[in-house]
Structures are given as structure tokens and as C-alpha cells.
Image: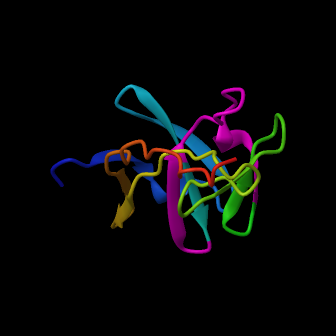
Amino acid sequence: MSGWQRVGRIEDFPQGHGRSVRLGERRVAVFRLDGEWFALEDVCPHMRARLSEGSVHGASVTCGWHGWTFDLRSGRSLTKSWARVRTCPVRVQGNEVWLGALEPVQPPPASGGG
């Protein structure tokens, strides 16, 4: 799997919770939810708290420090329209979990003149 990094076995990732792993020089929060897998850069853009330690509800995670919530699929904040964390693809092969590269940082959307 060129360009992919093995980060553990399925049983290393508790159902319904986040787990922080190292991907190169970054930390990534990996979430396993009812057979779906998600991975976000493991840092809230507000105060740099680890999202892997946040509470998971539906397909989102809420930072434990100040309550910012992020969509696990897109990395977009559900609390602050301008905030986003990078995501990366997850693959499961056999019993092993692999991560691809973090997506590039996207510029914030253009404001409507305000």
C-alpha cells in the first residue's frame, strides 16, 4: 500500500471513541463508529486540545475543552462556520488499519462582505 501507513489493528480502536496515532510528524484522531472509520488531525484549532479525547455523538466529535464540534466526515466545524480540521482516508485490510496522507489545508470560504 504505497503512501499508506499502518496505524494498528482493529481491536486497538474502541468502538465509539477516538484514539490518537502518529502519522509522520502529526497526530491523527481515528474513530470507529458502527463499521465506519474516520480520521481527523488530532488538534482543535481553538486551543490545540486533542479531538481524540472529545465526546463522540453521531458522526461528530466535540472538543472537551470548549465545546467546538466537528463533522467526522468533512472536518468542518458545526460550531464555528470558518473552522476546519484536516481529514485523511482510512482503509481496513484484514485486521489492520491504515491511514493515507492528511488532506491539504483548504482556505476558508469567502465572506459575504461582512
Q: Is residue 39 above or below residue 64?
A: below
Q: Which one is in front, 20 or 112?
A: 112
- Give the residues drawn in magenta, as a range: 34-56
In the image, taking residue 68 as reference, residue 109 lies left or right, namely: left
Q: Residue at x 32, y 46 (%)?
A: 101
Q: Residue at x 54, y 74 (%)?
A: 35
Q: Position of residue 44 (x, y in %)?
A: 65, 36
Occupied quadrant, residue 31: bottom right
Going by the picture, which residue comes out furthest to the front?
A: 113
Q: Residue at x 71, y 40 (%)?
A: 53
Occupied quadrant, residue 64: top right
Does 37 lie within the magenta span? yes
Q: Is residue 100 above or below residue 21?
A: below
Does 43 lie within the magenta span? yes
In the image, taking residue 84 as reference, residue 28 lies left or right, namely: left
Q: Which one is in front, 112 or 3?
A: 112
Q: Which one is in front, 91 or 95?
A: 91
